[in-house]
Image (cartoon, grey):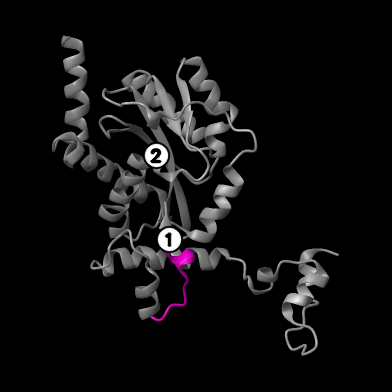
Amino acid sequence: MGPSERREMIRKENNKLSLTRQCKLLKINRSSICYTPLTRQRLIYCMRSTGYLQVSVPWQPPDCSLSSPIRVLGWASSRSSSDEHHGVPGDLQRAKHQQETPTTPHLSTPAERLAITRPNQVWCSDIAYIPVKRGFLYLVAIMGWATRKVLTWRLSNTLDASFCVEALEEAIARYGKPEIMNTDQGSQYTGAGWITTLAKANIKISMDGRGRYLGNIFIERLWRSLKQEAVYLHEITDGFQAKRIIDNGSGFYNSERPHTALDKQTPNTAYFGQAERRKAA
């Protein structure tokens, strides 16, 4: 008898046995009897709701919980289902992390321990969810740590690792290879395609520890800027529109958005300026 069948045997109206005692006898988790799985329809609804609030409730700080304004608008929600991480409600993000985290990851010294001072010293990569009318797309980006420049990006309608490898190969072809590539432990970054590409190019591998979201904080900041300043301003209906919006957003980020950490330079100015100075030296 499976857990779902045992949960059906729970009788909440039973006055003789408490719910805790019933769960213990049936060998099921007490919290599981109140859990309702997140359906795809509910997922899309949550994504649209949070995306709408990012634009329609500008007084809400982006790093604060969206639970309160969601309740004000009459939508039932919890912090975990309304707060976003890469554009995905908390329930799906936890499921994604559980599916993508391998049991035997390929680990080396994290790049965050080094002093990052020059272009192509360390690159990083991550995947974000882009909400569209009938679901969502997956966006991967390759970024240079020292200059914050978005080197390449790819959109996909699946989480297959091939679109990540294609973005990496394009970045290497256009800008040369980095000394170190830093990522999380997602299955796309621990699979044979990604690891083999890095190994052939003699690029050192750095992976953040489990739950270390701050290890890739620069690209996390990119997702926030890209979504708030481009993606959430539109109701994206298909991949063609998404590609155009992300292309414009990433172009603005690279060429027109100054960064305090770069002495008010744009990523393009910082990248190409440092590269020219290195050649001259």
Q: Position of residue 268 (x, y in %)?
A: 20, 31
Residue 273 within the segment the image draws in magenta: no
Q: Position of residue 278 (x, y in %)?
A: 20, 14
Image quadrant occupied by the C terminus: top left
Disc number for residue 133 = 1
Tell me if residue 259 can be seen.
no
> What residue is at 43 percent from the left and 39 percent from the top?
126
Mark 2 packing: few (<14 Cα in 10 Å), some, or many (20+)? Answer: many
Residue 74 within the segment the image draws in magenta: yes
> What residue is at 51 percent from the left and 15 percent from the top?
200
Image quadrant occupied by the N terminus: bottom right
Q: Is residue 10 above or below residue 64?
A: below
Q: Position of residue 270 (x, y in %)?
A: 19, 29
The span shown in magenta is: 73-82
Q: Quadrant of residue 66?
A: bottom left
Q: Is residue 237 above or below residue 203?
A: below
> What residue is at 34 percent from the left and 61 percent from the top?
235
SS for tag 1? loop
Looking at the rendered structure, the number of numbered marks drawn on it comes to 2
Q: Is residue 22 above or below residue 80?
A: below
Q: Give the residue at mark 2.
A: 216
Q: Main secondary structure of the magenta part?
A: loop
